[in-house]
Amino acid sequence: MKNLIAQIMKFGVVGVIAFVIDYGVMVFLTEVFGLNPVVSATISFIVSVIFNYIASMRYVFSHKEDMSRSREFVIFIVLSVIGLIINDVLMWAGTELVSIDYRIVKIFATAVVMVWNFITRKIFLDAGSTTQE
């Protein structure tokens, strides 16, 4: 259990940094370039995924020895694309259907996607996911 708590804390640190990248790029693209918030959120999400892959697979999750790095990357991207879909649906629903400010919706969407990311990466990518904690 101690290992899981430490892993969640590392995931949180990586997640906070990725959120700052994601949120900052989204606001910048929306406010400076006038992009639609859903488009900005999509671009910023992709930018943050690059950082997130490098940091998560280096500091948070243990590499599965029987999995190639290319397969690991593909799985990470597939899980991230699903996270992007969740993000974009929530951004669209929050801004277009409910008319909530995009910056507030992004915080909620990030929290939901964060849970998705941790659970699915733990299951599919972490070498420690098959052992008892």
Image (cartoon, rainbow, N blue to C red):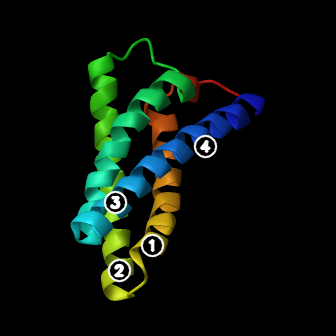
Kindly state the secondary structure of the residue where label 4 is placed: helix
**Relative to residue 122, is residue 27 drawn left or right?**
left
Residue plotted at (68% across, 27% down): 132
Where is mark 4, residue-wise?
A: 12
Q: Are marks 1 and 3 in contact (CB under 8 Å)?
A: no
Q: Quadrant of residue 28?
A: bottom left
Q: CA distance from mark 4 to mark 2?
A: 26 Å
Question: Residue 46 at what x, y percent from top left?
Answer: 29, 47
Q: CA distance from mark 2 to mark 1?
A: 7 Å
Which image quadrant: the N terminus? top right
**Relative to residue 118, is residue 48 drawn left or right?**
left
| Circle 1 Cα neighbour tier, 10 Å, few/some/many (<14 / 14–19 / ≥20) | some
Q: Is residue 82 visible?
A: no
Q: Earlier in the sequence, mark 3 or mark 2?
A: 3
**Relative to residue 53, is residue 61 drawn left or right?**
right
Q: Earlier in the sequence, mark 4 or mark 2?
A: 4
Where is mark 1, residue-wise?
A: 105
* Mark linked to residue 18: none
Towards the viewer: 34 or 56: 34
Report how many numbered discs are placed on residues in the image.
4
| Circle 4 Cα neighbour tier, 10 Å, few/some/many (<14 / 14–19 / ≥20) | some
Where is mark 2, residue-wise?
A: 95
Residue plotted at (42% across, 47% down): 21
Where is mark 3, residue-wise?
A: 28
Up/down of 111 relative to 36, above or below: above
| Circle 2 Cα neighbour tier, 10 Å, few/some/many (<14 / 14–19 / ≥20) | some
Q: Is residue 49 visible?
A: yes
Viewer-nearest of discs 1 and 3: 3
